[in-house]
Image (tube, helix red, strand yellow):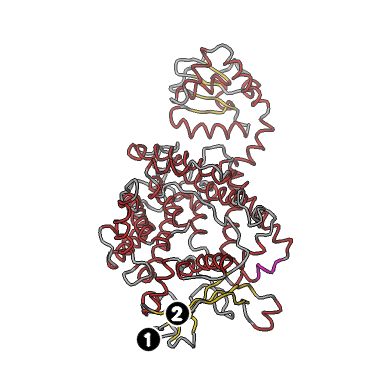
């Protein structure tokens, strides 16, 4: 006669490693509702069952004396805990279902000696659901650091870029958009199309106030004070600066920060003081969305490299050459990227075979490794190692602002708590239930609809990157009214590898005869100046000069001349500010060659730059070699 326990008791083989790991996982899911005991200790309760039977399957004893074994014991345990009760009901009611379940259970039980080492490799020593207290806490503090870097970097350039005496003043831009957008057909709401707090006040003082508020909020987020309010404030502030900054904030890492920052709102603990490692576990759906974002950033960047020229034809009607497809992209990358560093010079000298291998490695990491993100623990840790190394190599050979840091933060979420040192795991305050916590009601009301939209639009973006002829994403974003909020974005870094490096040199003159070049702080100019590191700071004017030079090259290739109307409006304004001697704009450059009075004339000279060869460097000491292409006449103030 079985002596009933006070609550359900599951008996298992305590000598089987697979059984012990499985029971530890069950403990996580069932909590205090079920007791567990190895048969080596509890066999006396069931003397009629032999040790060989205990080694074949688990047994469940319920308080009313009901005894079940094998698959039925597992399904009954789930039912008693309120999880997937329909499976136990199906097992009892549907003919044949119980037999199939028993056969599957017996197959797994007989294969434990084979399954156990495989699971040990793929999942680790434990089968418990992975927890992410440490990674999520470090992610949130790291995100605060990224916000701090991004806002501080913009703040020190703000006056020269979008201030009242800057290149493209935010006040003028908003005033112009406020007049033009309502005149469109159909009329557009300027506040909806350009959501920014600068509509309230676009003065220099207010813009500086936005930056100051952003810096304060980012510091508080790093400390762990009121993480949810700080994340909401930072997202609103950066979105406001993003739209006020116009094309100077048109980069993919800016929209990546906006999307990451918005999702992170749902990740943060709902406390005024988060502590070092908050006890409440982050919602699993939010972790999935952040990893889904990481997947899209990588996979879309890889896909567009192969598909950007699928329908592009050259002047002779042949497909446009794609340096990625023939594995020669790295032959150009190191010296044609926007802002190389001195290590880029050495990387460009690597053997051709290694450059080809590097391209293959890029495709592996961007097209294959992203699928590891959603795989077992072994693949997730492998993805972390490969993506981190990839980001490290990019940062070591080029200036890409806070992009590498932000991507590494997303990659950090691939590591569960078991990956971290023991002293960090001891710091976790496990005040929540052992099973992964669910989002609160107010978060669910926003999170679940947003997750559906993010998955839908994100899937369209992935398909669009792989099949660029499909045009279905933009209308859907417009209908949902979220385009200007940048909640879900498309990505595609290094879509096309440029094979030349045009550079614009701006020169000024007091007389129209003797010309002196303006030296930029970071972009290529002086041939003997070594390219320097400025990461994670982004000199946004220097970056835009790279794009403007490509524009000049394209126009010159077609017309052999670059007229003023071919120049971007912002570049024309930039030249105008130089002739006005704007101190805010001049602060964005290196030394001012006209300290006493601004030049009366400016002109633009277009060169083709490349890294020097080893022999040229030894002979001249120069890092760059350049060849003259074209120069404009002198411009003067009207």
Circle 1 — which element?
A: loop
Give the secondary structure at mark 2: strand
Asked whether the residues under the numbered discs 2 and 1 touch, taking CB atoms below 8 Å apart as contact, a structural biologist would say no
Front-most of 26 and 15? 26
C-alpha gap between disc 2 and disc 1? 13 Å
Task: Say few, some or many: other residues with alpha carbon within 10 Å of mark 2 (under 14 / 14 to 19 / 20 or more).
Answer: many
Badge number at residue 115 = none
* Residue 138 visible in image: no
Q: Work out whether residue 516 can be spotted.
A: yes
In the image, taking residue 327 as reference, residue 459 lies left or right, namely left
Image coordinates for residue 437, horizontal then vertical, percent: 41, 38
Residue 187 position within the rendered picture, expressed as x and y whole percent measured from the top left: 32, 47
Q: Which residues are magenta?
A: 346-350
Please determine whether, in this image, residue 240 is positioned above or below residue 168.
above
Between 583 and 31, the residue placed more toward the observer is 583
Q: Label 2 belongs to which residue?
A: 602
Q: Main secondary structure of the magenta part?
A: loop
Quarter location, residue 496: bottom right
Pick the quarter of the image with the C terminus. bottom left
Q: Position of residue 562 (x, y in %)?
A: 51, 70
Q: Is residue 458 above or below residue 357?
A: above
What crowding class fits label 1: few (fewer than 14 Cα within 10 Å), some (14-19), or many (20 or more)?
Answer: few
505 versus 489 height, above or below: below
Residue at the spot x=57%, y=55% of the render? 495
Residue wearing tag 1:
597
**With 259 as the anchor, is 236 left or right in this view?**
left
Which mark is in front, 2 or 1? Answer: 2
Between 336 and 633, the one lying in front of the other is 633
Whether residue 622 is in magenta: the answer is: no
Q: Earlier in the sequence, mark 2 or mark 1?
A: 1
Residue 199, x across and y down, in percent: 28, 57
Q: Quadrant of residue 448?
A: top left
């Amino acid at each position: 006669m079985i002596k009933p326990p006070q609550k359900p008791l599951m008996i298992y083989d305590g000598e089987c490693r697979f059984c012990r790991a499985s029971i530890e996982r069950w403990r996580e899911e069932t909590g205090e509702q079920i007791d567990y005991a190895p048969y080596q200790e509890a066999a006396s309760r069931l003397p009629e069952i032999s040790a060989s039977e205990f080694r074949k399957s688990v047994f469940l004893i319920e308080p009313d004396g009901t005894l079940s074994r094998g698959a039925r014991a597992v399904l009954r345990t789930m039912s008693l805990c309120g999880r997937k009760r329909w499976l136990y009901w199906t097992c009892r009611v549907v003919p044949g279902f119980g037999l199939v379940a028993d056969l599957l259970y017996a197959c797994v039980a007989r294969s434990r000696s084979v399954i156990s080492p495989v699971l040990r490799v793929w999942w680790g020593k434990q089968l418990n659901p992975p927890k992410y207290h440490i990674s999520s806490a470090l992610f949130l503090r790291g995100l605060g650091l990224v916000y701090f870097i991004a806002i501080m970097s913009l703040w020190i350039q703000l006056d020269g870029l979008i201030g009242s005496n800057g290149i493209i003043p935010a006040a003028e831009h908003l005033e112009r958009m406020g007049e033009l957008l309502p005149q469109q057909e159909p009329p557009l709401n300027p506040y909806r199309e350009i959501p920014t707090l600068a509509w309230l006040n676009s003065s220099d003082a207010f813009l500086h106030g936005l930056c100051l508020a952003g810096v304060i909020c980012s510091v508080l987020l790093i400390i762990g004070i009121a993480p949810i309010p700080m994340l909401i404030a930072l997202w609103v502030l950066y979105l406001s600066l993003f739209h006020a900054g116009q094309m100077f904030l048109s980069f993919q890492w800016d929209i990546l920060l906006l999307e990451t920052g918005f999702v992170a709102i749902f990740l943060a603990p709902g406390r005024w003081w988060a502590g070092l490692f908050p006890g409440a576990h982050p919602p699993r759906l939010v972790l999935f969305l952040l990893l889904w974002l990481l997947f899209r950033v990588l996979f879309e960047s890889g896909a567009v490299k192969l598909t950007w020229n699928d329908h592009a034809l050259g002047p002779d009607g042949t497909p446009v050459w794609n340096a990625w497809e023939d594995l020669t992209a790295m032959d150009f990358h190191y010296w044609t990227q926007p802002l190389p560093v001195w290590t880029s010079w050495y990387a460009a000298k690597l053997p051709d075979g290694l450059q080809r291998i590097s391209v293959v490695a890029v495709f592996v990491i961007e097209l294959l490794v992203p699928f590891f993100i959603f795989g077992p623990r072994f693949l997730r840790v492998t993805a972390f190692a490969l993506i981190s190394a990839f980001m490290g190599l990019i940062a070591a050979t080029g200036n890409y602002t806070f992009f590498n840091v932000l991507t590494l933060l997303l990659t950090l979420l691939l590591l569960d708590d078991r990956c971290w040192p023991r002293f960090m795991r001891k710091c976790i305050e496990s005040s929540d239930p052992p099973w992964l916590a669910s989002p609160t009601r107010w978060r669910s009301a926003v999170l679940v609809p947003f997750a559906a939209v993010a998955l839908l639009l994100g899937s369209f973006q992935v398909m669009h990157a792989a099949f660029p002829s499909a045009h279905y994403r933009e209308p859907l974003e417009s209908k949902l009214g979220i385009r200007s909020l940048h909640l879900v974005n498309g990505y595609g870094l290094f879509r096309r590898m440029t094979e030349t490096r045009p550079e614009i040199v701006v020169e000024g003159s007091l007389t129209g005869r003797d010309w002196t070049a303006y030296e930029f702080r970071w972009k290529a100019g002086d041939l003997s100046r070594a390219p320097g590191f400025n990461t994670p700071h982004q000199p946004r004017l220097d970056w835009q000069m790279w794009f403007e030079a490509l524009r000049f090259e394209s126009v010159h290739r077609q017309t052999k001349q670059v007229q003023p109307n071919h120049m971007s409006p912002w570049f024309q304004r930039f030249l105008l500010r130089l002739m006005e001697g704007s101190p805010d704009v001049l602060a964005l450059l290196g030394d001012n060659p006209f300290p006493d009075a601004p030049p009366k004339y400016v002109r633009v000279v277009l060169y083709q730059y490349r890294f020097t060869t080893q022999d040229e460097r030894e002979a001249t000491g120069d890092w760059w070699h350049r060849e003259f292409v074209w120069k404009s006449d002198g411009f003067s103030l009207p």
